[in-house]
Amino acid sequence: MPYTGQADGGLNTLRITIQDTAEALEMRLEGRVAGPWASELDRVWAETAPRLQSKKLVIDLHNVTYADANGKQVLRGIYAQTHAELLATTPWAQFLAEEVTAKKTTFVEEGE
């Protein structure tokens, strides 16, 4: 049964859903990883980390709408511990994944 935690019912919500399978632990984030919700993510991760064992961690960032500096730091800490696979298909989620993994994309103009 997945764990789903939601900080509040308004627009400033962070929903965290954890799905545990035989191969992986998936953490789906929806909403804002900011303010007190970054601390909530850190707390949920501290409770969840022991369940990871030899499984890979997948963090789904598809529905993250915003992350402040503290939220990015929490995500960086999780990534540093696990080298999680970050799922990101929107431009914002891709930017966030690059910020978290410290992988910067360089864009080169045609003809350079």
Image (cartoon, rainbow, N blue to C red):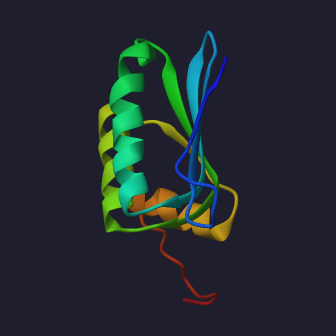
Q: Is residue 17 toward the left or the right of residue 52 in the image?
A: right
Tell me where residue 70 appears, x and y as whole percent. Answer: 31, 61
Q: Is residue 61 visible?
A: yes
Residue at 42%, 44% in the rendered image:
41
Depth order, front residue of 5/32: 5
Q: Is residue 103 visible?
A: no
The image shows a total of numbered marks equal to 0
Instruction: State which quarter of the image contains the N terminus.
Output: top right
Q: Is residue 98 toward the left or the right of residue 64 in the image?
A: left
Depth order, front residue of 101/107: 101
Residue 80, picture quadrant: top left
Residue at 42%, 66% in the rendered image:
104
Residue at 30%, 56% in the rendered image:
73
Residue at 36%, 16% in the rendered image:
50
In the rendered image, the vertical position of residue 58 relative to residue 66, given as above or below: above
Depth order, front residue of 52/110: 52
In the rendered image, the vertical position of residue 107 relative to residue 27, given as above or below: below
Instruction: State which quarter of the image contains the C terminus.
Output: bottom right
Tell me where residue 101 appears, x and y as whole percent. Answer: 39, 53
Q: Is residue 24 toward the left or the right of residue 34 in the image?
A: right
Tell me where residue 44 appears, x and y as whole percent. Answer: 41, 34
Tell me where residue 64 appears, x and y as whole percent. Answer: 59, 59
